[in-house]
Amino acid sequence: MLVALIAIDIPGALHFRLDTRDAHVAYLKANACVSQAGPLLNEAGDMCGSLIVLDVTDMAAAEAFVAGDPYGHAGLFESVELISWNKVI
């Protein structure tokens, strides 16, 4: 199943994101369930969140992925949503 992970950073936390970015990207690359991933950008073009499409067996696997993310461990996210997604195009 495909799951869209949409995470919004806490306000003013770009430094948390930059400090933890290498570990986060390594985590993405180490997990075969990551189909697509990239930062969300604010009006100024600064990173302010994440959009990751996961290809997982069930929602529990998506939740486990979130639990292991270095960004989450750093306290970067204000909110995280996991939404089942259906690829059309």
Image: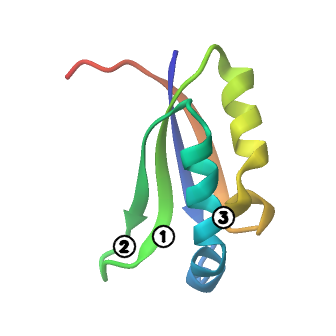
Q: Is residue 14 above or below residue 52?
A: below
Q: Is residue 11 left or right of residue 70?
A: left
Q: Quadrant of residue 78?
A: bottom right
Residue at x 60%, y 56% (from the top left corner): 26
* Pointer 1 with pointer 2, Cβ within 8 A: yes
Label 2: few (<14), some or many (≥20) within 10 Å? few
The numbered disc on residue 17 is: none
Q: Position of residue 56 (x, y in %)?
A: 59, 21
**Split into 4 quadrants, where in the image is the C terminus?**
top left
- The residue that disc 3 covers is 23
Disc 2 versus disc 3: nearer the observer: 3
Residue at x 43%, y 61% (from the top left corner): 39
Query: How far apart are the two marked residues, 3 and 1, measured between alpha carbons?
Result: 17 Å
- The residue that disc 1 covers is 48
- The residue that disc 2 covers is 42
Residue type, label 3? Ala
Residue type, label 2? Asn
Residue at x 62%, y 60% (from the top left corner): 24
Q: Is residue 43 above or below residue 70?
A: below
Q: Is residue 54 above or below residue 71?
A: above
- In this figure, which colouring scheme has been used for the structure? rainbow
Q: Earlier in the sequence, mark 2 or mark 3?
A: 3
Residue type, label 1? Cys
Helix, strand, or loop for circle 1? Answer: strand
Q: Quadrant of residue 20?
A: bottom right
Q: Earlier in the sequence, mark 3 or mark 1?
A: 3
Q: Position of residue 28 (x, y in %)?
A: 57, 48
Query: How far apart are the two marked residues, 2 and 3, measured between alpha carbons?
Result: 22 Å
Residue at x 65%, y 55% (from the top left corner): 79
